[in-house]
Amino acid sequence: MKYMVEIVKTNTGYSAHVPDLPGVFTVGDSLEEVGTFIQEAIQLHLHGLEEDGITAPPPKTNVIWVDV
C-alpha cells in the first residue's frame, strides 16, 4: 500500500503526517531524516494494528499539484 504523506518545512526542520492514519506523525532535521522517520512510524502503526487484529485502513487521500 502507498499512503500520502504531507511534509511541511518548519522553523527548525520538517514535520510529516499521514492523513489516512490519524496520529501518525514525526519531525526531523532534514527531508531525508523525516522521510525515514515517517516510514518507520507508518510501519510501526500498521504492525500495531495487525497485532490487535485490526485491518489497516486503505489509502484514500490523493494529491494534485495546481499551477497558478
Image (cartoon, rainbow, N blue to C red):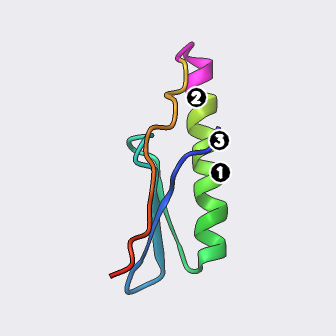
- Badge 1 marks a residue whose secondary structure is helix
Front label number (3 vs 2)? 3
Instruction: Classify 10 Å Cα crowding around label 1: few (below 14), some (14-19), many (20 and above).
Output: few
- Position of the N terminus by quadrant: top right
Asked if labels 2 and 1 touch by Cβ distance under 8 angstroms, the answer is no
Image spot of residue 34 (x, y percent):
58, 68
Residue 50 counted in the magenta span? yes
In this figure, which residue is indicated by the disc labeled 1?
40
Residue 42, given in percent of the width and then of the height, sits at 58, 45
Identified at 59% across, 76% down, the residue is 31
Q: Residue at x 65, y 51 (%)?
A: 40
In the image, what residue type sits under mark 2?
A: Gly
- Answer above or below: position of 43 versus 68: above
Query: What residue appears at the point 44 percent right and 40 percent down from the top-left corner?
Result: 21
Mark carried by residue 43: 3
Kindly identify the amino acid type of the residue bearing the numbered disc 3.
Gln
User: Closer to the N terminus: mark 3 or mark 2?
Assistant: 3
Is 43 one of the magenta-colored residues?
no
| Farthest residue, direction left | 68
Q: Quadrant of residue 6?
A: bottom left
Q: Residue at x 62, y 44 (%)?
A: 2
Distance from Cα at disc 3 to Cα at disc 2: 9 Å
Dot placed on the residue nearer the N-terminal end, 1 or 2 = 1
Q: Nearer the viewer, residue 39 or 60?
A: 60
Image: 38 above or below 50: below
The residue lying toward the viewer, choosing from 48 and 1, is: 1
| Residue segment shown in magenta | 49-54
Residue 48's label in the rendered image is 2
Crowd band around label 3 with a 10 angstrom C-alpha radius: few (<14), some (14–19), many (20+)? few
- What is the spatial separation of the Cα atoms under label 1 and label 3, in whole angstroms? 5 Å
